[in-house]
Image: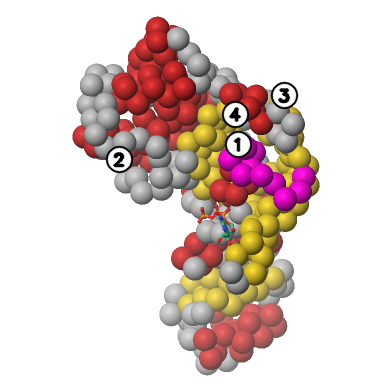
Amino acid sequence: MISVTGLARTFTTKTGPVEAVRGIDFEVREGEILGLLGPNGAGKTTTLRMISTLIEPTAGDAVVSGADLLRDPRLVRSRIGYVAQGGATHDEELVIDELVLQARLFGLSKRSAVANAESLLHTLDLDGLGGRKCKQLSGGQRRRVDIALGLVHQPNLIYLDEPTTGLDPQSRANLWDHIRSLRERGTTIVLTTHYLDEADALCDRILVMDHGEIVAEGTPDELKRRISGDVISLEISPELAARAVEVADGALELRSQLTEGHLVHLTVEKGDAAVVPLLHALQSAGIVPGSLTVKRPSLDDVFLTVTGRSLRDGDQG
Ligand SMILES: Nc1ncnc2c1ncn2[C@@H]1O[C@H](COP(=O)(O)OP(=O)(O)OP(=O)(O)O)[C@@H](O)[C@H]1O
């Protein structure tokens, strides 16, 4: 459905060039939900904007839904739906008017526009809300109208930029269901997210992005399997961290270790079996951890392993 080669974008700013996307290659298969996962500034939005023709790449090319990105941008645009981060609805407009206008902008007849709008309101569980002003909707409802706007000209490919940011947990779960049901109806979906749980729950495949590059790729399970072993996290004051790692290394077969502030993460083959010998060794060295947790690898651990940083930290920074 999408084939991207060497796609790059450098922005010129007062403080010098910013290499937002540094020559990436990827494919999107028909009917899948592909997630671009990464912290703020990783290059996810820039990638989406390039493959939707909103900004020009500095280098590289792509074929999107059978149309060439650089040579046939209008055809690309007609075949995709793009739902931007902030949405595109206007407070004072009626929901139905927004949808019909959007469909008309794509050249649909009045009749088809109304029919598509009504049908999408039904699909996205917005029955009876067409006559409301956009500002009279809840956050989750309004986000679904954004998605309807992206679909009203009936593309079979839709891009969702951070679809659930700002929604409460219940509305997020509800929107996930809707996104899944779009896939069931045959729509191919590319979405960006910096939520690990979202990528894990929703995506068939994930591209992990960092600093404008794809640093890992696979299904959520494949990515997690790449990190074999369990992670033991110890809460320890930073001045004792190096000594604690030394002691742990003497007592266990460590696969890897990482210190982040008050936390020391140790990767071992079997977490449960390692806890008692580890605590004994630490105690003998006079180190008492504030807490100890053992967990199976998560997507965050994958991110930690491939980038040396936690996605959560990158997220806050
Ligand atoms: N128009 C622009 N001019 C200059 N720099 C830009 C521009 N747009 C994006 N950037 C920079 O490019 C980099 C990638 O930004 P991008 O928005 O693609 O990241 P992102 O992964 O989508 O992040 P977020 O999760 O915050 O949306 C960042 O360093 C950003 O500051």
Report the residue at 46% width, 65% height from top: 316
Measuring from the top left, give residue 17's x and y in whole percent.
Answer: 66, 65
Q: Secondary structure at mark 4?
A: helix
From the image, tell me which residue sits under label 3: 66
If the picture is divided into quarters, which one holds ligand 1?
bottom right
- Amino acid carrying mark 3 in the image: Gly
Query: Foreground residue, 219 or 285?
Result: 219
In the image, taking residue 199 as reference, residue 210 lies left or right, namely right
Q: Is 119 placed above or below 58 here?
A: above
Q: Amino acid at mark 4?
A: Arg
Label 3 lies in ligand 1 vicinity (Cβ under 8 Å)? no
- The boundaries of the magenta stretch are 50-60
| Count of numbered circles on the image | 4
Circle 4 residue? 77
Identify residue for label 1. 52
Question: Alpha carbon of mark 1 to alpha carbon of mark 4: how far?
Answer: 6 Å
- Check disc 1: other Cα within 10 Å, few if <14, some if 14-19, many if 20+: many
Inspect the image, locate mark 2, and give the three-letter code of the amino acid beneath it.
Gly
Mark nearest the camera among 4 and 3 is 4
| Residue assigned mark 2 | 139
Label 4 C-beta lies within 8 Å of the nearest ligand 1 atom:
no
Of residues 316 and 281, the one drawn nearer to the viewer in this rendering: 316
Neighbours of disc 3 within 10 Å: few (<14), some (14-19), many (20+): some
Q: Residues at badges 3 and 2 in contact (C-beta under 8 Å)?
A: no
